[in-house]
Image: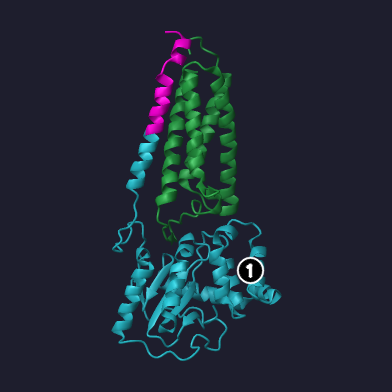
Amino acid sequence: MNKEEKTKSGMPLGIIVGVLVAAVVGMGVLYSCSGKPANNGTPNKNTPKNTQATIQPNAPDGATPPNLLGSPTATVTVEEFADFQCPSCGDKFPVLKQIQSIYGSRIKFIFRNFPLTMHDKAYDAAVAAEAAGLQGKFWDMQNQLYTNQKSWSVDPNYKQVWADYAQKIGLDVEKWKTDMAGLQTKSRVDADMARAKALQVSSTPTVYINGKAVQYAEMTVDTLRTLIDSELSANQASKPASTGAANTGNSNSGQK
Amino acid sequence: MKVLKLIALVLSLIGITDSVYLTVHHYTAEPVPCSIVAGCEQVLTSSYAEISGIPLAAFGAAAYFVAFCLIVLSIYGNRITWKLFGIQATLMALFSCWLIYVQANYIGAFCQFCLLSAFTSFLLFVAFVISLFVRRNPMS
């Protein structure tokens, strides 16, 4: 058989079609075997476990006053350790925002900065949020950072982008820049990181409800509601929240 | 020469497999927490990972499949397709260099499966370059 006959034969087409079919079948097999966690909240095998399942009372306090939403006197505390450049934290941001909205002053929601060293802009992002907090706009800046995480995370001009966010949320941008360069904001971030390290927090986001760690796979609205409701019931209903309890006189709480 | 083409064929199959896995992963994987030790899927969830909502890996799978087709046709005697493959391999290698640059300088993290694809593209290019210097065997 000469070369021309080989070319004209069905072999090349057969091989090409065969590989195409194999690729499509392989895709289907991979898709059907995808490792999504069970709906019953069974932790995904990839979920790293925190070393400390419960918060030890002698752990450092973290930034004082903390970034807090809800009521400071609520009997249920939801404490999140997160990194602004962490994709999973961005993924869970709407979930936790919904929890805040559902429970309002029935819970005390605290955000702790825990920027990971592998994220080159995370520490600066935490400082930027804290600087916004000094003007009472921490939560607005948090919203901007998480909502636009994918774009600024890969933007070499990220600081200008953040300055645009600062202007958008109504900050005194020059003061914000000055505060970013100052020690107060960095000290707050460092204090939260010290608390995280003392608790041996090993991943972000990490959430504690009344001091008990919540696995990543459990960070859905429904599961968190179950856990929080359980704590509320155990405490036999929360104390009545004071009017405007989120505004405790410091600039880091309650401003959403 | 034929050996080079067979090597290129195997490489293109590796590229197809890798890209198909990344494409499926894009649509099915639950985000994992960012671990202090193991990192997180920063590359695969970055804005560079897709074009108009289509994962970059899908384009990669299509490109490797086209390369595979060109190599198969070349093995069966079509000389033009090997030259076309050479052009494609060059473009894929250049694009892979760009993606590595993006990972290093913009994203600040690397994805091992993405690096495997880049390495595969580069080897395809090398196979073509070597073929330019190999004396043609009348039997190939």
Question: Left or right: B131 with respect to A163?
Answer: left
Q: Nearer the viewer, residue A56 or B63?
A: B63
Asked if residue B131 lies in the magenta stretch, the reply is no
Across and down, in percent, residue A79 comes to 42, 75
Q: Nearer the viewer, residue A118 or B114?
A: B114
The span shown in magenta is A1-21
Q: Which residue is farthest right?
A: A174
Give the residue drawn at x 52%, y 52%.
Answer: B109
Instruction: Write down the colour of chain A.
Output: cyan
Quarter of the image containing the C terminus of chain A? bottom right
Q: Is there any visible trace of residue A54 in the rendered image?
A: no
Amino acid type of the residue that numbered disc 1 sits on in the rendered structure: Tyr
Magenta span: predominant SS is helix
Instruction: Write down the colour of chain B.
Output: green
Please tell me whether residue A89 is drawn above or below residue B112 in the rendered image. below
Image colouring: by chain
Per the image, label 1 sits on a secondary structure element best described as helix
Which residue is denoted by mark 1 in the rendering?
A: A165
